[in-house]
Amino acid sequence: MFSNRLKTFGSLARASAAVAIVAATAFTSMAANAGTLTVNVSARANQRSTWQDAFDKFQKANPDVNLKVSYITEEAYKVQMGGWLATDPPDVVSWHDGERMAYYAERGLLEDLSPDWAKNGWNEQYASVKSASTWNGKQYAAPLGYDAYGFFYRKDLFAKAGIKSEPKTFDELLESCKKLNAIGVQPIAVAARDSWTLAAWFDYLDLRINGNEFHQQLMAGQIPYTDPRVKKVYTTWKTLMDNHCFMENALSYDVDSIAPILVNGKAAMMLMGTFFSASFPANMKQDVGFFRFPIIDANVPTAEDGPVNVLLIPAKAKNKADARRLLAFMETPAINAELAQGWGQLPSNNKAAEPDDPISKVGFQTLASTRGGIAQFYDRDMQKEMADEGMKAMQQFYSDPSQLDTLLARLETTRQRIYHK
């Protein structure tokens, strides 16, 4: 009996030791990860140093946090985002406001940041972008910079072509294209390989022709794509094509490869967000101007695209405490302003210093004077699947405008399937 008890005692001792080892290992693991904060950021190469400067300042102010940042190219990021959030996400991710944010909030994949908005004074400091950061009455996003969209242009090429002022109407834009073609300069560069750049064209043509109220109804799936007002957007777009306003082989260029076309003077204009100003060398920035998308119908209130970039905390994040510390740091007026300046954007914090960059100043004034509303951007205002199909159709239209009726019919079938489930 004593022998049996001894064996039992030995077994219990070994079991207790095993439990202790497991517990110690778990504790050690938890201790090692307790201060680790993982962040995934979507960034082009020329944006990373600005991000890193801000992260370095956070790290210096919070030496107890082991910050690990991963930079990922924009298109790859879009593909991977949903998978991260649903499975094993980092603690913080960069993303977009509006429908893009709401899509994941609705599915329970994002942390509710409403308490942070109240605690940190964001309700006042970020009042202008609060609605874009809200879903179902709660805030799920921490806003960063936002972009004004318009035409970058080469002042020297305009002068060479005899264009005496920035085009303010659609007819003046067509006339400018004619003059630039006459001197052998492609009027407008387009990075059509990135389909979202074409979406900017659709947005502005629709906003200028039909107005923001119609545009938002279309984005919400409430307007048929076979509606004559939608077709007018594309036929007006085709007018620009017929007048040789766009560069050749645009579908071969993405945003990262398009800048040399303007820098080398092979094209004179480009419709893009203010962030693109970082693509120009410092020694030529004085030769680059920026103007609002021209008016097409003077009776339509002028609206603009002003998409907001944000930070999110995934619902399944492991280190939410330090994630909130990072967001609070990034949302301070000084850091918000520094990020916006480095990206060529506008600070969304109303206590941040106004930008002194000439391009950003024009963008700031453009959005500040807008009376017709501010849209988030085609693929940020619209349900993702519909946006993806719409942008694919834009590339096909750009490649072969004669297929317009077929494309619109297909988009209408897709709209009915998605919104009438």
Image (tube, rainbow, N blue to C red):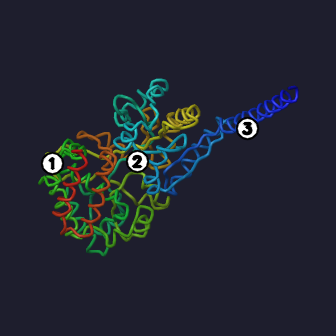
Element type at mark 2: helix
Give the x, y percent position of residue 137.
35, 28
Cα distance between the residues tagged 1 and 3: 70 Å
Is residue 70 rendered to the left or right of residue 145? right
Q: Position of residue 260 (x, y in %)?
A: 44, 67
Crowd tier of the residue under label 3, counting other residues whose Cα lies within 10 Å: few below 14, some 14–19, many 20 or above: few
Q: Earlier in the sequence, mark 1 or mark 3?
A: 3
State left or right for residue 125 relative to residue 268. right
Residue labelled with disc 3: 25
- Comparing 264 with 218, the one in front is 218
The C terminus, quarter of image? top left
Q: Residue 153, located in which quarter of the rendered image?
A: bottom left
Question: How many marks are shown on the rendered structure?
Answer: 3
Which residue is label 1 attached to? 298
For marks 1 and 3, give the one nearer the viewer: 3
Q: Is residue 157 left or right of residue 82?
A: left
Sequence-wise first label, 2 or 3: 3
Q: Amino acid at mark 3?
A: Thr
Q: Where, by quadrant of the figure, is residue 128 drawn? A: top left
